[in-house]
Image (cartoon, rainbow, N blue to C red):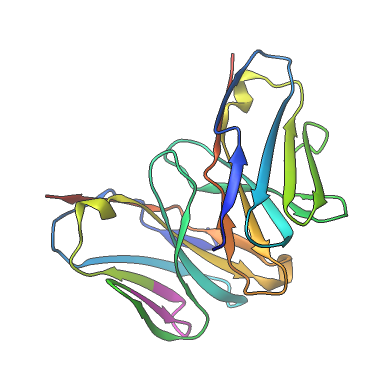
Amino acid sequence: QKEVEQDPGPLSVPEGAIVSLNCTYSNSAFQYFMWYRQYSRKGPELLMYTYSSGNKEDGRFTAQVDKSSKYISLFIRDSQPSDSATYLCAMILYNQGGKLIFGQGTELSVKP
Amino acid sequence: GAVVSQHPSRVICKSGTSVKIECRSLDFQATTMFWYRQFPKQSLMLMATSNEGSKATYEQGVEKDKFLINHASLTLSTLTVTSAHPEDSSFYICSARASGGADTQYFGPGTRLTVL
């Protein structure tokens, strides 16, 4: 079992739809949770960064963390074709030097 | 803020040659930098963690003599792929973690290496 599980998709939605991306994890030692967006042939770009359970909102993006269920989500409202990319969840494991553990990434396509 | 650059963005080399990739944090100091490798349609695979002024820590299965990492300053880390072979062809991405700040990593744009 991988430490971080993420459905690779692909996920295709119409423009304007609400997108829900999810990851589950097995190690309760994870403390910080991130969502990165990666366009093709580019480096990942940090979208959201959360620590505690609950919701964090930034524009059209909402990150949700449920530590009791070991489940994190990223919601994208009013999705746009420019949101088409691969979304990677990532978590920091402090007892291993703070390195990031990534999910597999979900490929999202928003159709006009 | 939090910009990380990589150079070159693309490199093509002959088998047996060495290639150096630079990673720079442009507007912050990075005590720690990380080097990743990414194959098509796959997630990032951590190769090594580089701390300024000390030896890099390599992940299991990564050959330290083949992938030489130097982190000589708080804004620069280099990855040298020595005696490159076609199987080393990949997308190499670095990230930097700010000194004394939050624990987020900021990624460079990546370097596409093709070994002929």
Q: Residue at x 73, y 15 (%)?
A: B16
> Residue B68: in sight, yes or no?
yes
Chief SS of the magenta region = strand
The location of residue B9, given as percent across then percent down, is 55, 33
Q: Residue at x 68, y 39 (%)?
A: B22
Q: Is residue A65 magenta?
A: yes
Q: Residue at x 78, y 31 (%)?
A: B66
Q: Is residue B99 magenta?
A: no
Count of marks, rendered view: 0
Q: In this rendering, is residue B57 above or below B102? A: above
The location of residue B95, given as percent across then percent down, is 62, 53
Q: Nearer the viewer, residue B7 or A3?
A: B7
Q: In this rendering, is residue B65 above or below A101? A: above
Q: Quadrant of the N terminus of chain B?
A: bottom right
Q: In this rendering, is residue B70 above or below B91? A: below
Q: What residue span does the magenta drawing correspond to?
A: A62-72
The location of residue B99, given as percent across then percent down, is 72, 68
Q: Quadrant of the C terminus of chain B?
A: top right
Q: Quadrant of residue B84?
A: top right
Name the residue furthest right: B54
> Residue A9: in sight, yes or no?
no
Q: In this rendering, is residue B46 above or below A58? A: above
Q: Nearer the viewer, residue B1 or A110?
A: B1
Give the left or right position of residue A102, taking residue B22 as reference: left
Q: Nearer the viewer, residue A10 or B103?
A: B103
